[in-house]
Amino acid sequence: DMPEGKVENQKYDDRANLLPGDTSTTNGNSTAYSGSKSGFLSFDFYQSLFDVDTDTVYNRLRSSIIPRKNFNFIDSVLRSARRKNNGPDMYGPFWICVTLVFSTAICGNLANFIHRNGDPYWNYSPEFDKVSMVATSVFGYAYFLPVVIYFFIKYKVNGSSNNSSGSLDNSPDYRFMEILCTYGYSLFVYIPISVLWVLPFESFRWILVLVGAGVSGSMLAQALY
């Protein structure tokens, strides 16, 4: 028979979560993620962030594109009690960004071809420089802004803590990977929009841009405001 101490340790090890380096506890509606002590430079750290099943990614994509009132993506999806041990992932955000880069570049070239088609003085040539330009914009937005938001939230929470004698039970305790994951999934709405940009109607394109900004911005605002 296995000693009681070893049984307890085995149960504790089975609680290892998707995001290593944190402690996993659930108090009420708040959840902090935990797992092994893998370092930031270790392979296990990044492997765990891509260890996610298809259903989880699908549910997060659906939640990011369907506007809902008073819906917090971080609390309702990333910290949902129905998805225990499925913390923030980088699989969805990474492939969303990659897909958006190529769909925007390809559809941009195709839209330019449709617009110029029939012009006898124009010779078509693929504009591969659009790929690098779009990649810089998309990945810069998806990875740089979360860093700014994270430090801004930490600054505000620390400032409020210094100016208040009471405890801050309602203060945001968002981790960087949660913010990064939320920003990545918020870009999903732009993938179908980038495909529809092929249609040669300038006013329709601007309407699509505004719709995408509204859906994505609403998701981010409700999660982070």
Image (spheres, helix red, strand yellow):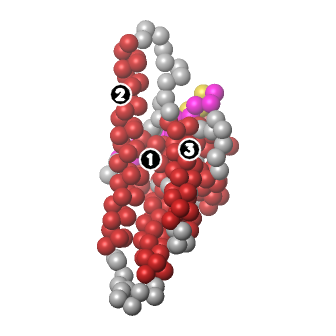
In this view, the residue in front, 26 or 69, is 69
Residue type indicated by callout 1: Leu
- Where residue 25 appears, as percent x and y from the top left, is 56, 32
In this view, the residue in front, 40 or 128, is 128
Residue under pointer 2: 155
Residue at (37, 33) in percent of width and height: 152
Q: Are the residues at dot 1 and dot 3 in contact (C-beta closer than 8 Å)?
A: no
Circle 2: element type: helix
Residue at (46, 85) in percent of width and height: 117
Q: Quadrant of the N terminus?
A: top right
Tell me, for residue 180, which label it has, or none. Answer: 1
Q: Which residues are magenta?
A: 28-39
- Where residue 43 appears, as percent x and y from the top left, is 38, 57
Residue type indicated by callout 2: Tyr
Whichever of callouts 1 and 2 sits on the residue coming sooner in the sequence is 2
Judged by depth in the image, the label closer to the viewer, 1 or 3, is 3
Residue under pointer 3: 219
In this view, the residue in front, 5 or 72, is 72
Circle 3: element type: helix
Find the distance from the CA under tag 1 to the CA under tag 2: 18 Å
- Quarter of the image where one finds residue 153: top left
Q: Is the residue marked by circle 1 packed among few (<14), some (14-19), or many (20+) residues within 10 Å?
A: many
Circle 1: element type: helix
